[in-house]
């Protein structure tokens, strides 16, 4: 179910999520969000579902004006650290 790095970058761009870098680490993709924190996306889950969920979370955090340190999608529910 693993997706390659260039595909992950394309999906992020297609969903208008601005990032500075995407790297591969163990079982996850690390996405550095421009002007904010880091996202951990699981290689074992549907990347499109994770990114659409990320989009909703980022929209809510932007509305609330909350910067975050990290959002981790490797678990059942995303874990957000502030």
Image: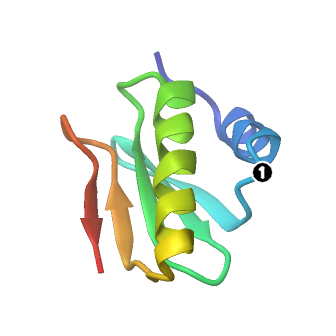
- Where residue 71 sits in the image (x, y, percent)? 36, 61
Q: Is residue 4 left or right of residue 65?
A: right
Residue 65 position, x and y percent, is: 51, 82
What residue occupies the far top of the structure in this picture?
A: 1
Tell which of 25 and 36 is nearer to you: 36
**Residue underneath mark 1:** 16
Q: Position of residue 5 (x, y in %)?
A: 66, 41
Q: Nearer the viewer, residue 76 or 63?
A: 63
Residue 2 against residue 77 in the figure, above or below: above
Q: Percent x, y for residue 44?
A: 35, 25
Residue at image position (46%, 76%) is 64
Element class at badge 1: loop
Left or right of residue 17: residue 3: left
Image quarter of the C terminus: bottom left
Q: Is residue 56 left or right of residue 17?
A: left
Vertical side of 61 occupied by 13: above or below: above
Residue at coordinates 46% horizontally, 83% vertically from top-left? 67
* Residue at 37% in and 70% down: 70
- Give the residue furthest to the front: 63
Indicate whether 26 appears above or below 32. Answer: above
Q: How many marks?
A: 1
Q: Is residue 69 above or below residue 9?
A: below
Q: Residues within 10 Å of mark 1 (few under 14, many from 20)?
A: few
Q: How is colour applied across the structure in the image? A: rainbow
């Amino acid at each position: 179910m693993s997706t390659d790095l260039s595909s992950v970058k394309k999906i992020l761009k297609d969903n208008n999520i601005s990032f500075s870098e995407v790297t591969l680490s163990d079982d996850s993709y690390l996405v550095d969000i421009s002007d904010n924190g880091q996202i951990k996306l699981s290689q074992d889950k549907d990347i499109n579902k994770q990114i659409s969920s990320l989009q909703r979370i980022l929209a809510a955090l932007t509305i609330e004006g909350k910067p975050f340190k990290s959002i981790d999608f490797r678990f059942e529910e995303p874990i957000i650290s502030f």
